[in-house]
Amino acid sequence: MKALRLTSFGGPESFELCDLPRPVPHAGQVLVRVHATSINPLDYQVRRGDYPDLVPLPAITGHDVSGVVEEVGPGVTAFSPGDEVWYTPQIFDGPGSYAEYHVAAQGIVGKKPSSLSHLEAASLTLVGGTAWEALVVRAALRVGESILVHGGAGGVGHVAIQLARAIGARVFTTVREANFEFARSLGADVLIDYEKEDYVDAVLRETGGRGVDVVFDTIGGDTLSRSPDVLAQLGRVVSIVDIARPQNLVQAWGKNASYHFVFTRQNRGKLDELSALIERGQLRPHVGAVYSLADIPLAHARLESPNNGVRGKIAIEVGPSAS
């Protein structure tokens, strides 16, 4: 099979396209012909060496799969050859999705929503599961509450806006003015151009000084330390970004705020919940660009570039009929 293998930590040139033996499913596993995958910030973080102790080299990386079951191992009852499936491979536990075939435990695999193409499905597994865990499991966002989604035009952000809208929350988001219409089409209620206005001032103005119930941090920087400034009493902050340096969160005490740090876990349950939203027309991933397996290094370079012009996700066409 063709696979893109990471041979050293560094820039996008650290990958090599090679031929490797096709994996064999063992008990409780399925062998999937990968039709599509996608690019996430986690992908380039792994590539540049942020987690060297967790990724032995050489390695096949990648964290999204949409494809078709090719073969099942002993004891598999949930799937049969020919089933269309989607999932996130176990992170830091075995080969990833930058290959024509992938083996996964049946417990993390879900039936692909029929209304999505493989490119769309592969663009949703990791970011969708992350947004679900952040907003539903950790923040416990409720109908009638308000949420500030940082980076609403990005991979996780554009899913979070739709999920918050489906829950029944009032959605604030920070995006550049060029992405206002895109964010509005996702269901955002209040659009804040972070290049022209301080988001703290905008949120307090729009809420009459009360603040929002939840802040969802997808961008890092000083977001954690500034979040108490926009939080209502008993507000919650959920972050999916590594903390690069210590931050003073003392102001959070005055708001009785709670902070949650999310590294998403893989399971079929979240995929099934996302599928239900998709079938009800409340959630749809946006594919902003498509590359081939061989051109994944170019996709990495683009996603890492500031103001890269990508709305939603960069998808990768691996096998046939991805679109």
Image (cartoon, helix red, strand yellow):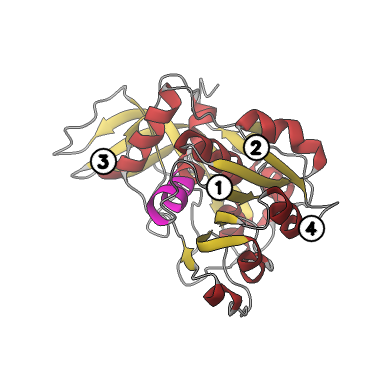
Dot 1 corresponds to which residue? Answer: 146
The answer to which image quadrant residue 263 occupies is bottom left
The answer to which image quadrant residue 102 occupies is top left
* 235 and 77: which is toward the camera: 235
Marks 2 and 1 sit apart, C-alpha to C-alpha, by 10 Å
User: Residue 217: in sight, yes or no?
Assistant: no
Question: Which kind of residue does numbered mark 3 sit on?
Answer: Gln
* Residue at (41, 37) in percent of width and height: 101
Answer with left or right where residue 19 lies relative to residue 103: right
* Secondary structure, magenta segment, majority class: helix
Residue 137 part of the magenta-drawn span = yes
Question: Which kind of residue does numbered mark 4 sit on?
Answer: Asp
Which of the two discs, 2 and 3, labels the residue nearer the N terminus?
3
Residue 198: mark in rendering: 4
The answer to which image quadrant residue 185 occupies is top right
| Label 1 with label 4: CB-CB less than 8 Å | no
